[in-house]
Amino acid sequence: MTSEGPPARKVALSVGAREDTSGSRPRVLVLGGGFAGIGAAQKLKKSDVDVVLVDGHDYHTFQPLLYQVATGLLEEPAVGHPIRDLFDKQDNVRVHQDRVTGIDLDAREVRFAELAPERYDYLVLALGAEVNFFGVEGAAEHSFPLYTLPDAVRLKNHVLERWEAADRDPKLVEEGALNMVVVGGGPTGVETAGAMAELYNGVFRKDYPDVGPEQARIVLVESSPEVFSMFKEDIRVYTREALEKRGVELMTGDVVESVAPERVTLKSGTVLSAHTLVWGAGLQGNELVRSLGLELQRGNRLAVDEELRLAQHPEVYAVGDIAAITDAKTEQVLPQLGSVALQSGEHAGETIGRRVAGKETKPFRYRDKGTMATIGRGAAVVQMLGGRTMKGKAAQAAWGTVHLALLPTNEDRAKAVVDWAGAGFTHERSGRIRVET
Ligand SMILES: Cc1cc2nc3c(=O)[nH]c(=O)nc-3n(C[C@H](O)[C@H](O)[C@H](O)COP(=O)(O)OP(=O)(O)OC[C@H]3O[C@@H](n4cnc5c(N)ncnc54)[C@H](O)[C@@H]3O)c2cc1C
């Protein structure tokens, strides 16, 4: 157990910094409105603090279902929830939409694109991760990552546009207009490849009777010998079979060397004609962490102590994907998962509340919900930290339970149950429209 009272001083305002309207209460600045930032701010509801939460978007993104937006199964509001709505009953929170541009840990001040600089007594860094293209030629310019809601909409629009174009001009099919290469055999790549295969073989078969999915290839490229290398053998075998059953071609042990708008070249020399390359190959910590002058862990993540604080700045908490959080039980760094983000964010919020109240604080303990992924309808996998595995419909039910708990409100949970049940039952993809703006 550790204990440390509230900061000795209330921060002084620098010239141009935002006025502290409370007069006396500690100010907690939460950067990021993902699972981690929302969890932290909500846990401060009853604390005697002023909370300011800033996110570049005015909505909270439910990333696990982005692939369902990209494949037309869900519409945008099903995975994006207004952040302000999450705090309309929490008087001590103010929400701003703005981009964080700089963090000065020594001055305890954060700069934004438009807001005046904000000073803080406590800072919660919950800015998540960003896509890592590993310097692959053409990847940043021509590929389709799947990390944000705009990414999902962009991918959906592109796929719909290519099918419409091929329907008008069948020559495009031979040129690879309908082919898709998905890079990365982790959860993002596998889920996307499986969902796209179901989209192609399901509604597109009906929508485009003159084109036909048998003319389109979906190829999953993974550098390791197998997809889902982080999972146990039985899950890896199951996943390979489930993908192949859906018509996904697996190219393992190969890497993408370069990407052009209509072509993907692999290191082995294989050239794939494809007008769509989905990049699910890797993440790195948010670019802002590189400007902090701190030593970073693998994947540019911030090292934290057992209470999720930065060693040299105990008033700063790093939570969720931006942090390398070591699990106390296994001594392994926890994966970048929604449950880890939510629990770590909530722990930071609770700890700050206890500290402000002069109470003892506790180290973070992760409650394992399992690592899980969906490959397609009725095909999911789950692996618990202890190694126990589940596959198929039972795993899909577990996936649903865990992910419902991650949704921000009861209203969202009720809506998700209806959406998921409806989509599973009818296989309808009413989101497969392209809205030009
Ligand atoms: C496609 C995909 C599928 C996934 N599937 C699953 C799954 O099935 N199960 C699971 O448990 N996990 C899954 N994950 C992982 C999970 O979604 C993440 O671990 C989790 O969202 C991390 O939460 P976070 O709060 O740390 O970061 P995020 O959710 O990324 O939130 C960070 C927030 O910071 C904001 N931000 C970033 N930079 C700035 C800036 N400069 N200025 C202002 N705001 C900024 C962003 O707008 C964002 O709202 C998936 C992730 C992806 C990408």
Image (cartoon, grey):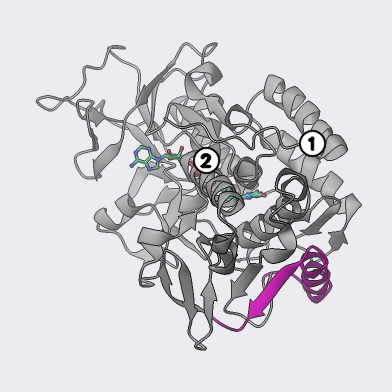
In the displayed structure, does residue 51 sit left or right of residue 16?
right
Q: Is mark 1 within 8 Å of ligand 1?
A: no
Give the image location of residue 52, x and y in percent: 37, 24
Left or right: residue 170 versus residue 315 is: right
Chain part drawn in magenta = 230-254
Q: Which residue is mark 1?
A: 423
Can the viewer see residue 149 in this picture? yes
Give, as a three-letter code, the residue at label 1: Ala
> Which quadrant, please, contains the C terminus?
top left
Q: Residue at label 2?
A: 153
Name the secondary structure under disc 1. helix
Q: Is residue 51 magenta?
A: no
Q: Residues within 10 Å of mark 1 (few under 14, many from 20)?
A: some
Give the label on residue 152, or none.
none
Residue drawn at (52%, 51%) of the image: 146
The amino acid marked with disc number 2 is: Val
Confirm whether the magenta stretch covers residue 232: yes
- Sequence-earlier tag: 2 or 1: 2
Q: Position of residue 426 (x, y in %)?
A: 85, 35
